[in-house]
């Protein structure tokens, strides 16, 4: 990441578009440049790296808030695409639905869409969300394309577009922090009518493909593989939780197994989306995400704990619980499960939020101890 290039490009933009912002920018410029000079002179250090991360985050917010640009785009070698901020009252005149095998061009790169294309509308039909896996032509890599199209200027449509913008910024922040397990943002194109995000697709077999959909419990080998791969997954969730962001949409299809043993998230799920009753995957939805949620806690860290444990329960036993309030012991269906592991998962699946593991780190640590 060429921060000097980014600072020089941003300085030119500030000078030409909003010279009144020069004092604020100059302070950020000085602080980041000072960090970079210390690193060149004395080498890398944890304190300097932490300070640099804080300043870059401020520059990301500054660049986006004032110019609708991504600061890390300015730091990359290729020429960034600059989109002028436009009035928010305009309305898209027609629908542009994606279809499989269609070619989409984003910031000069061409992408061939794969089936299926996932499409969802806001309840008031003011915005459309669509998502599809694609092949980036010329680069020989798989990517995910996500788009929000606005048809009316409503609070809901604004929230959906903002959620995608925040996801783009989150992926930038994770890359800047060198969180290499997360997808990398490749492009973000937006105007008054739409926002489109392109990020890398993790290549690997999903948990659904690896552990199947049999009504029988997993054999001892696959049981150990599933539980051990869960530890790495908890590490990724812990990174999100440290930012007070929560996935809230965990499914076996969205968890990928690399190197035959390490589980990774396909994306950040609903981490940047506002909570809406009824959100999340039908089969693995936590009680507090339901439409009937009146007194339960707002979805958070324990929601991810619950969803992950429900996926494990489904694979380990070959079935879903008959009742969310009364769970049979897992070892009664799978002899490879110890009573200690069963206790950890039973607590993770507690119906009341306050009875579950408090954090994903607590859950992971307890699970790891039973596997050792």
Image (tube, helix red, strand yellow):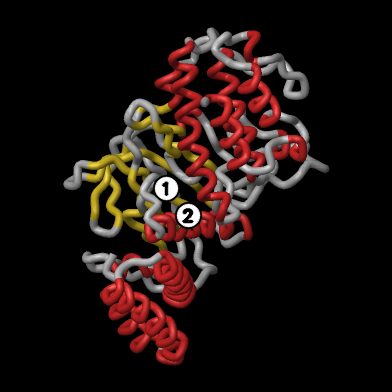
Percent across and percent down for residue 303 are 65, 39
| Kind of element beneath mark 1 | strand
Name the residue beneath numbered marker 1. Answer: 146
Q: How many marks?
A: 2
Residue at 40 percent across and 48 percent down: it is 96
Residue at the far left: name it: 138
- Which residue does the image show at 35% across and 51% down from the upper left? 184
Residue 68 visible? The answer is no
Sequence order check: which comes first, mark 1 or mark 2?
1
Q: Position of residue 11 (x, y in %)?
A: 33, 83
Q: Is residue 19 above or below residue 188?
A: below
Is residue 123 shown left or right of residue 130?
right
Quarter-of-image position of residue 97: top left
- Residue at (55% x, 46% y) in the render: 270
Can residue 321 be seen by looking at this rendering? yes
Q: In front here: 112 or 201? A: 201
Secondary structure at numbered mark 2: helix
In the visual, does 277 lie left or right of 181?
right
Image vertical order of residue 317 relative to residue 164, above or below: above
Image height of 29 relative to 23, above or below: above
Closer to us: mark 1 or mark 2? 2
Give me the residue at 56% from left, 53% from top.
242
- Give the CA distance from mark 1 to mark 2: 10 Å
Where is mark 2, residue-wise?
Answer: 167
Q: Nearer the viewer, residue 169 or 195?
A: 169
Q: Are marks 1 and 2 in contact (CB under 8 Å)?
A: yes
Residues packed near mark 1 inside 10 Å, few (<14), some (14 to 19) or many (20 plus): many
Quarter of the image that includes the N terminus: bottom left
């Amino acid at each position: 990441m060429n921060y000097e290039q980014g600072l020089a490009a941003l300085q030119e933009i500030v000078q030409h578009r909003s010279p009144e912002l020069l004092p604020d920018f100059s302070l950020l410029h000085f602080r980041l440049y000072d960090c970079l000079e210390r690193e060149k002179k004395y080498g890398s250090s944890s304190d300097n790296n932490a300070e640099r991360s804080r300043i870059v985050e401020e520059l990301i917010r500054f660049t986006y808030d004032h110019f609708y640009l991504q600061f890390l785009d300015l730091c990359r070698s290729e020429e960034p695409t600059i989109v002028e901020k436009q009035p928010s009252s305009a309305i898209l005149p027609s629908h542009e639905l994606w279809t499989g095998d269609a070619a989409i061009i984003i910031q000069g790169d061409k992408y061939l869409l794969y089936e299926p294309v996932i499409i969802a509308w806001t309840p008031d039909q003011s915005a459309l969300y669509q998502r599809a896996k694609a092949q980036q032509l010329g680069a020989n890599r798989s990517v995910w394309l996500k788009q929000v199209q606005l048809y009316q200027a409503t609070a809901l449509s604004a929230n959906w577009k903002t959620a995608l913008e925040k996801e783009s910024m989150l992926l930038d922040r994770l890359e800047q922090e060198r969180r290499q397990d997360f997808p990398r943002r490749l492009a973000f194109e937006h105007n008054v009518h739409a926002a489109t995000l392109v990020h890398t697709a993790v290549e690997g077999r999903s948990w659904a493909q690896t552990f199947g959909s049999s009504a029988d419990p997993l054999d001892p080998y696959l049981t150990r593989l599933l539980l051990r791969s869960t530890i790495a997954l908890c590490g990724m969730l812990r990174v999100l939780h440290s930012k007070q962001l929560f996935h809230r949409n965990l499914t076996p299809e969205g968890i990928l197994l690399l190197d035959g043993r390490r589980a990774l998230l396909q994306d950040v799920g609903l981490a940047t989306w506002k909570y809406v009753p009824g959100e999340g995957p039908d089969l693995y939805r936590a009680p507090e995400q339901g439409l009937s949620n009146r007194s339960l806690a707002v979805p958070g860290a324990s929601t991810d704990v619950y969803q992950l444990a429900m996926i494990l329960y489904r694979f380990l036993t070959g079935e879903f619980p008959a009742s969310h309030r009364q769970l049979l012991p897992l070892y009664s269906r799978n002899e490879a499960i110890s009573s200690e592991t069963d206790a950890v998962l039973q607590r993770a699946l507690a119906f009341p939020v306050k009875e579950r593991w408090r954090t994903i780190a607590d859950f992971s640590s307890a699970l790891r101890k039973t596997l050792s």
